Image (spheres, grey):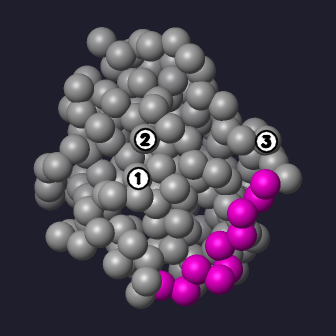
Amino acid sequence: MVEAFLGLGSNLGDRHTLLQAAVDALAAADGVMIRAASPIYETPPWGPVPQGPYLNACLAVETSLPARALLDLSLAIEREHGRERAIRWGPRTLDIDLLAYGDVAIGEPGLVVPHPRMSERAFVLVPLADIAPRLVIAGEPIGAWLDMLDTSTIIPRSDLAPLTTPGRDRAA
């Protein structure tokens, strides 16, 4: 079993329902067990495309899937929930990013782990630090990366129900 971290985001449709649908789909997949879900945050969009705010969260999972299979599963879940990749950094119903996969570094076409830009993105690091406060990214503790970023626009959404993680273990 490998510990992996996933970033979730949505800024189209019923954002909260879409994040929960991603959690449910991942939990139902063979070889994936969700260990923790971060609180939900509302965050401004990132990148050059004008769009509405996101809801973001992170998950800690244990998986028997290889990194490529976990990524493929995540992409399939995105598609099932209406994700279209027409505009880079554009609005999306659902985004699931593979942030880290154990201690390994992977650099293959279409798969780079740890996620190459997560240390630049407060909307990833704030919820990730909630569930993995001792995580080391590129040789630095997550707190050191957070200290270099403006986190003032990352707003906790305690008014939203927490993401629920089904209790059954489907890891193979």
Q: Residue at x 52, y 56 (%)?
A: 130
Question: Label for residue 161?
Answer: 3
- Mark 1 and mark 2 lie on one chain; the one further toward the N terminus is 2
* Label 2 Cα neighbours within 10 Å, binned few <14 / some 14-19 / many ≥20: many
Which one is nearer the viewer's eye here, 82 or 4? Answer: 4
Q: Is 91 on the left or on the right of 170, as rendered?
A: right
The quadrant holding residue 75 is top left
Which residue of the protein is positioned furthest toward the front in this rendering? 134
Give the main secondary structure of the magenta stretch: loop
Task: Determine the residue positioned at 17% across, 49% down.
Answer: 103
Marks 1 and 2 close (CB-CB < 8 Å): yes
Element type at mark 2: strand
Q: Is residue 143 left or right of residue 124?
A: left
**Amino acid identity at mark 2:** Ala
Report how far apart the C-alphas of labels 1 and 3 lie in the structure.
Answer: 21 Å
The stretch of residues the image draws in magenta is 149-158
Badge 3 element:
loop
Q: Residue at x 71, y 41 (%)?
A: 162
The kind of residue tagged 3 is Ala
Relative to 160, say whether 72 is above or below.
Answer: above
Give the percent coordinates (x, y) of residue 108.
15, 54
Q: Which residue is mark 2?
A: 60
**Residue 138 locus on image (x, y percent):** 20, 69
